[in-house]
Image: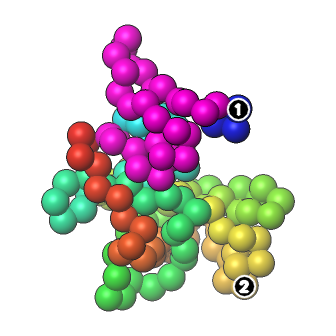
Amino acid sequence: MALADLMVVMDEGHIRQAGAPREIFERPMSSFVARFIGGHNVVPGERGLVAIRADRCRLGAAGSGPYLSGRVAAVEYQGPLVRVALETEFAGQATALLPDKLFYAGPVAPGERATLVWSEEDVHALPNA
């Protein structure tokens, strides 16, 4: 993505989406594209599958906004970020990329229960889910 002006995502010899790298990353057209380019959670929404960027997810409590609960499967320190992967009942594995300061203010460990929360404005409907 860093080197291209135009990005083409192909699957089984077919173009699934083409456009500027930022456009594809911000608005993937399908669950395949969202998963292939990475950095997204694909979860069931009110009207089908939706994508939420992992860097827009936080650990928190189920509240008035969207959330997904599960058991912590992995915690990976990546320097400025900590990747927390949850194994969930309905969406498989979901990930949050947290600034290290935020993670260490309320750390979790593998095996613990946790909840990913995000803002409704960060939900992207997948038209070709």
Q: Is residue 115 magenta?
A: no
Which residue is at the far front?
5
- Please provide percent x and percent y for residue 37: 52, 38
The residue shown at (45%, 74%) is 118
Left or right relative to 75: residue 118: left
Which residue is at the far bottom?
64
Frontmost residue, 66 versus 105: 66
Residue 29: name its quadrant: top left
SS at circle 1: loop
Left or right relative to 56: residue 129: left
Which residue is at the far left?
47
- Please provide percent x and percent y for residue 121: 39, 73
Frontmost residue, 78 versus 33: 33
Number of the label disc, if any, that sits on residue 3: 1
Task: Name which residue type carries label 1.
Answer: Leu
Numbered disc total: 2
- Please provide percent x and percent y for residue 46: 18, 65
Q: Which residues are magenta?
A: 4-31
Residue 79: name its quadrant: bottom right
